[in-house]
Image (cartoon, helix red, strand yellow):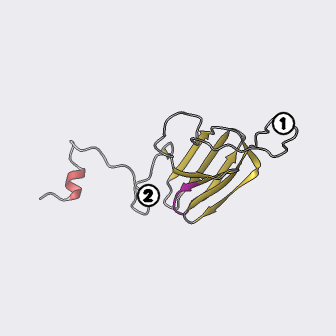
Amino acid sequence: MANLADMNNSPSLPEPPPSDTTGQHSAPAHNVKTPVLLWAQRRDRLLITVALSDPCDPQVSISPTHLSVACATPAGERYRTCIELLREVEPEKSHWVATPRGIQLSILKKAVSSGSPRCERAKHYWWERLQKQEGKPWCV
């Protein structure tokens, strides 16, 4: 039986990727993964969880029509996603927090006025999906 060093010198096998000082293989700089998003909604807000263990240096950007999340893990893996939301939200009234189990966002839906001056109460509609894109993406 050949040992691992003999197999690595074999011309028919490709060279292993470079490893860092911990012995783990380092990922290329362009290798960014897409995190899994879990979402729920209430009448007036979206509750989104980016499911990652121990996110490091999270960067969250919420605009009226887009949500962008980028972060890394202690193992050096990088994650990033940007989605176009189905309807508009209120970024200034939304907030997020990084926890050991992921990044949790509470995003306020933009109220839609009823058009009637007699009815001052704004309506919030239930969203049939999170993204503007039709169909169910694999990461949500």
Q: Is mark 2 on a helix, strand or loop?
A: loop
Q: In this view, does 10 lie to the left or right of 57?
A: left
Q: Residue at the location (79% across, 44% down)?
A: 122
The image quadrant where one finds the N terminus is bottom left
Observer-nearest of 69 and 113 = 113
Q: Which of 120 and 64 is in front in this view?
A: 120
- Circle 1 sits on which residue? 116
Q: In which quarter of the image is residue 110?
A: top right
Position of 16 with respect to 87 (left or right) is: left
The residues colored magenta run 49-55
Q: Quadrant of residue 99?
A: bottom right
Please state which amino acid type lies under the numbered disc 2.
Asp
Task: Determine the residue positioned at 49% across, 54% down.
Answer: 77
Q: How far apart are marks 2 and 1 (CA)?
A: 64 Å
Of tags 2 and 1, the one toward the viewer is 1
Q: Which residue lies furthest to the bottom in this view?
A: 100
Instruction: Please determine whether, in this image, residue 119 is positioned above or below residue 51.
Output: above
Considering every residue shown, the one lying at the far front of the view is 118
Picture coordinates of residue 88, whole percent (x, y): 70, 39
